[in-house]
């Protein structure tokens, strides 16, 4: 086998290992999926009636009241799912790094990157499974996308790409954390960014300073791209910005994570 | 020197410091192929750091290290392909079964499907884990975990194996079993470097011992060579009668005796000449001796003699 074949084979082995570990510890995945579902129910049934008034007909997908707000908030809840899931990734990575098994991998002739690649791919699979559950729940509550098959595929692709980026970021945060406790806290700002963007209310309703931040932080173009694909609102330049942000975050986080992994214990 | 007779492990002038603390202060080692080599020393002597350097986990600050003919700093992947490491803390996937752990190793060693299956089941059998292979490793005892850990290390058929304190925390039965497994490996031509703070373990297993204290090599040799370096060796004579005890004691310099056991102890430097002299003195006086045994001091004595301070183990006993 060539080096590339070994790298692929090792990455596949490590992905299988991590997926199996996630399946053995399902309570964590369920807990992480539970959070966005609780927020979905809370925002639609508690705040939705009131919040729907400020949306206007287009953003509400021509529905009224709670149904309109449900229509609006689903992309935000999906990103909340991603943010919650990658918090789990940081914890899993930090836990794995503190165990003895990682030293075993480091003394074996395996592709260096495969340990992290395995974590990342397994976490993306986990996140996508979580998203499927949340989407199913939203549909059960009455969410009806206007999207055709192509738009759904594009939306899933967007979610996968952004998840991939945030999973790499969470992996780096998990590696950077001195303890598992720290690793469980550092990715929390991602959850906050969903709220400080167009996830739950339109950016235009925010005060000036916050509006500037909300408009230009990465979650907003991703939210708007998803919203456009799923419910037919205008996407505009958001798609390019969303893909660029995702690629940028993934690339920088990948370099950071690999750097941290190589230098771990090496001092 | 032919390639085959080259040592499996060579370290020259290895230094390592963490922050301002010097952990290894110029360590030299040479381990012959197919032998068991013990790094002996108390906690904090630098044993684990040495293993981490030899197994490519960390780089030395200075000095050179070759394992299986490759430089650990410049050719780490070649070294990794030749070694197996069983660390002090178990390197198992706790969420998985013993079999899954073994299969993971087979996959990472790129064994084919059928080769993987036969290698895994052979090793599980050899380490007495076949019956529990499908149980999660969290249900394993300490001894079982160590055995699985070693079995996982062997999946890749390593030529050089590092064992960091392989029996620490094991009960005597599991310890014996582990010793048996380690001896079995060398019979297959593998080279083993192990660390231990158990002096009897080094005595039991190692062909060659290096005593490490505070990051320096303070003594090296075989267990017997080390024991001979310390004063306090003696010859014990078992006498047939109380009368012969008294006659013999009068003839022998510095002898002490135990009248009830009919035993005489004579200090010796352990050389053949001294022993011959002793026997000829007894022979000339026509004294019959029942049994004769030579007692060299144990490694606790050695440690004290070479480092000037006792091991923690010995301190705990006193």
Image: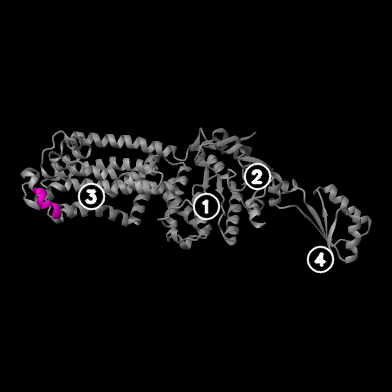
In magenta stretch: residue B147: no
Q: Nearer the viewer, residue A60 or A254?
A: A60
**Disc 3 to disc 2, C-alpha distance:** 58 Å
Q: Which residue is mark 3?
A: A131
**Disc 4 to disc 2, C-alpha distance:** 36 Å
Q: Are marks 4 and 1 in contact (CB under 8 Å)?
A: no
Q: Name the mark on residue B211.
A: 2
Q: The magenta stretch spans which residues? A: A44-52
User: Quick one: label 3, few (<14), some, or many (20+) residues within 10 Å?
Assistant: many
In magenta stretch: residue A50: yes
User: Quick one: label 4, few (<14), some, or many (20+) residues within 10 Å?
Assistant: few
Q: Which residue is mark 4?
A: B261
Q: Are marks 3 and 2 on the same chain?
A: no
Query: In the rendering, at what x and y percent does residue A188 appear?
Result: 29, 45
User: Quick one: label 2, few (<14), some, or many (20+) residues within 10 Å?
Assistant: many
Q: Are marks 4 and 3 on the same chain?
A: no
């Amino acid at each position: 086998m060539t080096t590339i074949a070994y790298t692929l084979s090792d990455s596949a082995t490590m992905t299988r290992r991590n997926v199996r570990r996630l399946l053995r510890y399902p309570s964590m995945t369920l807990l992480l999926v539970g959070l966005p579902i609780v927020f979905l129910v809370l925002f639609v049934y508690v705040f939705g009636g009131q919040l729907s008034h400020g949306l206007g007909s287009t953003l509400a997908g021509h529905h009224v009241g709670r149904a309109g707000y449900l229509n609006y908030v689903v992309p935000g809840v999906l990103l909340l799912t991603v943010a919650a899931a990658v918090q789990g990734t940081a914890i899993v990575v930090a836990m794995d790094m503190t165990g003895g098994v990682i030293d075993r991998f480091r003394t074996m002739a395996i592709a260096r990157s495969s340990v992290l690649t395995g974590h990342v791919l397994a976490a993306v699979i986990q996140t996508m499974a979580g998203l499927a559950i949340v989407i199913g729940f939203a549909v059960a509550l009455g969410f009806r996308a206007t999207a055709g098959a192509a738009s759904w595929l594009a939306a899933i692709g967007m979610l996968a790409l952004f998840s991939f980026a945030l999973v790499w970021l969470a992996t780096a945060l998990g590696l950077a954390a001195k303890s598992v406790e720290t690793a469980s806290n550092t990715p929390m700002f991602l959850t906050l960014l969903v709220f400080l963007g167009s996830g739950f209310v339109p950016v235009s309703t925010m005060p000036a300073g916050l509006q500037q931040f909300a408009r230009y932080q990465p979650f907003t173009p991703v939210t708007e791209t998803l919203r456009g694909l799923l419910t037919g609102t205008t996407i505009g330049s958001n798609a390019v910005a969303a893909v660029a942000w995702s690629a940028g975050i993934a690339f920088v986080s990948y370099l950071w994570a690999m750097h941290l992994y190589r230098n771990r214990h090496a001092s | 020197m032919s390639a085959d007779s080259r040592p499996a492990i060579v370290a020259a002038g290895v230094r390592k410091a963490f922050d301002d603390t010097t952990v290894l202060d110029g360590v030299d080692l040479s381990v012959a192929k197919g032998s068991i080599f013990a790094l002996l020393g108390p906690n904090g002597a630098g044993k684990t750091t040495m293993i981490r350097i030899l197994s490519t986990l960390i780089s030395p600050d200075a000095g050179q290290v070759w394992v299986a003919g490759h430089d650990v700093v410049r050719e780490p992947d070649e070294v990794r392909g030749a070694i197996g490491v069983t660390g002090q803390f178990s390197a198992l996937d706790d969420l998985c079964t013993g079999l899954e752990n073994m299969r993971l190793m087979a996959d990472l060693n790129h064994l084919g499907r059928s080769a993987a299956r036969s290698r895994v089941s052979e090793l599980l059998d050899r380490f007495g884990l076949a019956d529990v292979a499908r149980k999660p490793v969290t249900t394993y005892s300490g001894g079982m975990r160590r055995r699985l850990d070693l079995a996982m290390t062997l999946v890749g058929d390593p030529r050089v194996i590092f064992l960091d304190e392989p029996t620490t925390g094991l009960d005597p039965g599991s310890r014996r079993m582990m010793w048996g497994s380690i001896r079995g490996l060398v019979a297959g031509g593998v080279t083993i470097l192990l660390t231990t703070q158990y002096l009897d373990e080094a005595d039991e297993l190692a062909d060659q011992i290096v005593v490490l204290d505070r990051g320096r090599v303070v003594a090296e040799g075989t267990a017997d060579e080390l024991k001979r370096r310390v004063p306090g060796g003696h010859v014990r004579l078992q006498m047939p009668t109380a009368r012969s005890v008294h006659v013999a004691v009068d003839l022998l310099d510095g002898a002490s005796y135990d009248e009830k056991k009919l035993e005489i102890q004579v200090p010796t430097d352990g050389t053949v000449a001294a022993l011959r002299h002793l026997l000829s003195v007894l022979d000339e006086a026509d004294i019959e001796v029942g049994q004769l045994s030579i007692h060299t001091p144990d490694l606790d004595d050695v440690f004290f003699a070479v480092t000037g301070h006792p091991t923690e183990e010995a301190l705990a006993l006193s």
